[in-house]
Image (cartoon, rainbow, N blue to C red):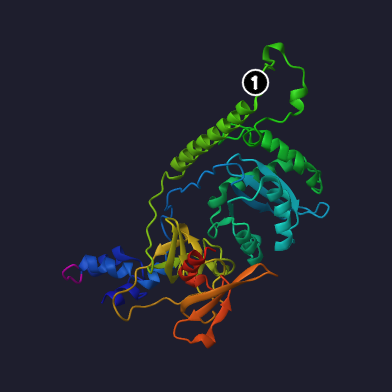
Amino acid sequence: MLTEAHESPLETAHMGAEKLWYRLSPKFYWKRMKADVVHFCETCDVCQKIKTSNFNCYGYLIPNPIPSRPYASISMDFIVNLPMCREFNAVFIVVDRLTKHANFIPTSMGISSKEFARLFTKHIICRYGIPESIISDRDPCWTSDFWKGVAQEIKTKMLLSSLHHPQHDRQTEILNRLLETMLRAYVNADCNNWVEWLHLLEFTYNSATHSSTSTTPFFSLLGFQPCSTLDHLPKSPIFAQDDDVDRSADDYLAKIAMHRDSARQAIALTQHEQAKSYNKGRKAAPTFHLGSKVLLNPHSLEWAESKGEGSKLTLRWIGPFEVTECINPKVYHLCLLDKYPGSPVFNIEHLKAYKEPTEEGRTIMPESAIWKKESQEYEVESILGHKRIWKTKTLKYLVRWSGYGPQFDEWLTARDLRNASNVLREYWKLNNL
């Protein structure tokens, strides 16, 4: 009776529990009828996949940890699709997360992972040392096997964002917008001389007081403010600075330490205020346990089926998928077949809990998109060893499949084992990788 009334296009046509209750209550009654109607609609596979969410502001802001020293933690990103100037058409931006000191490095969109590694070594590592952690989006440069190998070699932790969640690296996103605005003020009509202004705008940004630290990036990093054109103007005697300053080494180092500590405290206060503003109108994120099932929103992820002709009639949610790891309260790793694009790590804003039907014979909604054919998957029993391919800086793992003998052991990369992340992580811990 519930199936007929809920699924029939002549009755309620999946309109929800309230409509189903009003349709049935004048004609039928049984004990706990309302509860059964609500449960039946909540566990309807079709309803869960075709309906949009009325509220999706789940999860409070989780600020990134504050670094202990300059360039211990950096964030980086690209500004791409710029007009060709000399051999450059992109800007590589690197920001120190403590002092907010920035580097604007001209580059090309077509560089390989090896060329990018040389660029990073030349402009960052050779000037400021090896960072302990790097925050970035999922640009192909950072997700390549070569760059992963480089990061492992220099013992740097890559903190990649989940798909379509730019808030993870909001600091660099804001700086990208600021640099684009400054460049518009100085480029010529053909917009092909932007490289000539890049180093000047870098100096300007690093000389300006930052709202988070209440001091300039130059002063936080160097301990002094470099002179600019205004410093060479005639000074009034009233505002002349006292040149009789104690410049002993101990006082100088203590002054730098004091200002950096003040910067950390200012960043902590700013993060508190940002979290307070961000969390207004938001609810605590739902918790998904290991093994639980969730649905995925291909429209918020801008996958192919959410675009073009007919996209308004495609499913709002696809799945269900099993949760294999909770990375943090707002980010989860899913068991995702390789027919789906991108990384299997998703922010809570792209997920919702799936309620499995308890009755037999319920209608299951098929996927409306035609994905590429998935590969066969086998269960990993254990990882027996690893080797490094030095030519590509890639780690490969010797895998023993569950239910198969040693003759079927196979060498695979970490990407091939993305749905066996728990087994891989345990192996890393045991071997200090």
On the image, the x and y values in percent for residue 369 come to 53, 74
Residue at the image point whose x is 33% and y is 78% from the top: 362
Closer-to-camera residue (328/187): 328
Residue at the image point whose x is 34% and y is 68% from the top: 355
- Which residues, given as a range, are shown in magenta? 27-32
Quarter-wise, where is residue 16 in the image?
A: bottom left
- Mark 1 nearby-residue class (10 Å; few <14, some 14–19, many ≥20): few
Query: Which residue is most to the left?
Result: 31
Closer-to-camera residue (264/38): 264
On the image, the x and y values in percent for residue 374 come to 54, 79
**In screen coordinates, is 337 left or right of 141?**
left
Amino acid at circle 1: Asp
On the image, the x and y values in percent for residue 33 come to 20, 68
Identify the image quadrant of the C terminus.
bottom right
Magenta-drawn stretch, dominant element (helix, strand or loop): loop
Question: Which residue is label 1 attached to?
Answer: 246
Q: Is residue 307 magenta?
A: no
On the image, the x and y values in percent for residue 39 come to 28, 68
Closer-to-camera residue (358/406): 406
**In screen coordinates, is 398 left or right of 124?**
left
Identify the image quadrant of the N terminus.
bottom left
Q: Is residue 29 magenta?
A: yes
